[in-house]
Amino acid sequence: MAIKQISIFVENKKGALADVLKCLSDKGVGLRAMTIADTKDFGILRIIVDDREGAVAALKEQEIVFSQNDVIAFEAADVPGGLARVLKIIMDADIDIEYTYAFVIETGKHACAIIRVSDVPAAEKVLEEAGVPLISEDEILRI
């Protein structure tokens, strides 16, 4: 049930992020989730989109450097400690967490977290066994 995330290399200069986002929007690609981590010289933009094939075509057309990675999306309670509880399940299974980002689906009730881990199938298994609702790519597009 892994979800494909697109990771895009973005120079840390004025207008670079806007240019990438315009490249996608010009092709009708919408963002479902987004995060960016930056350094002095560049950033890595991580996105989940509503049209991955369209995004890939647009990025290739503009010669923008990107990669695709498998990530897991899951539901966590939108309460203090909701995400921490789920991350502990993964850590207790000795699965490395590379990064995570999240957004609220319904305030005070549900949040969606996106997580990159060292072993996607193992993480999916321990989350399912713990009763953590996984979110499919189709479901994330309907949020």
Image (tube, rainbow, N blue to C red):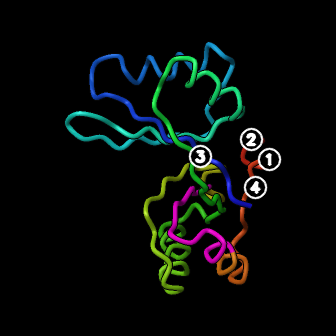
> For mark 4, what is the residue?
136
Q: Tag 2: residue type?
A: Leu
**Residue 141 screen position, x and y as percent:** 74, 41
> For mark 3, what is the residue?
5
Q: Is residue 109 above or below residue 123?
A: above
> For mark 2, what is the residue?
141
Secondary structure at badge 2 equals helix
Q: Nearer the viewer, residue 92 or 120?
A: 120
In percent of the image, x 61 and y 21: which residue is there? Answer: 58
Q: Is residue 109 left or right of residue 138?
A: left
Separation of marks 3 and 2 at Cα, in angstroms: 13 Å
In percent of the image, x 61 and y 65: which residue is there? Answer: 77
Q: Tag 3: residue type?
A: Gln
Residue 106 among magenta residues: no
Q: Nearer the viewer, mark 3 or mark 2?
A: 3
Q: Is residue 24 left or right of residue 12?
A: right
> For mark 1, what is the residue?
138
Asked if disc 3 and disc 1 are in contact, CB closer than 8 Å, the reply is no
**Residue 34 screen position, x and y as percent:** 52, 40
Q: Nearer the viewer, mark 4 or mark 3?
A: 3
Q: Answer few, some or many: residues within 10 Å of disc 4's Cα (few below 14, many 20 plus, some between 14 and 19).
A: some
Q: Is residue 92 above or below residue 103?
A: below
Separation of marks 4 and 2 at Cα, in angstroms: 9 Å
Q: Earlier in the sequence, mark 3 or mark 2?
A: 3
Asked if disc 1 and disc 2 are in contact, CB closer than 8 Å, the reply is yes
Q: Nearer the viewer, residue 80 or 43?
A: 43
In percent of the image, x 79 and y 47: which residue is there? Answer: 138
Q: Which residues are magenta?
A: 112-124
Asked if disc 1 and disc 4 are in contact, CB closer than 8 Å, the reply is yes
Q: Nearer the viewer, residue 53 or 127?
A: 53
Q: Quadrant of residue 132?
A: bottom right
Q: Answer few, some or many: residues within 10 Å of disc 3's Cα (few below 14, many 20 plus, some between 14 and 19).
A: many
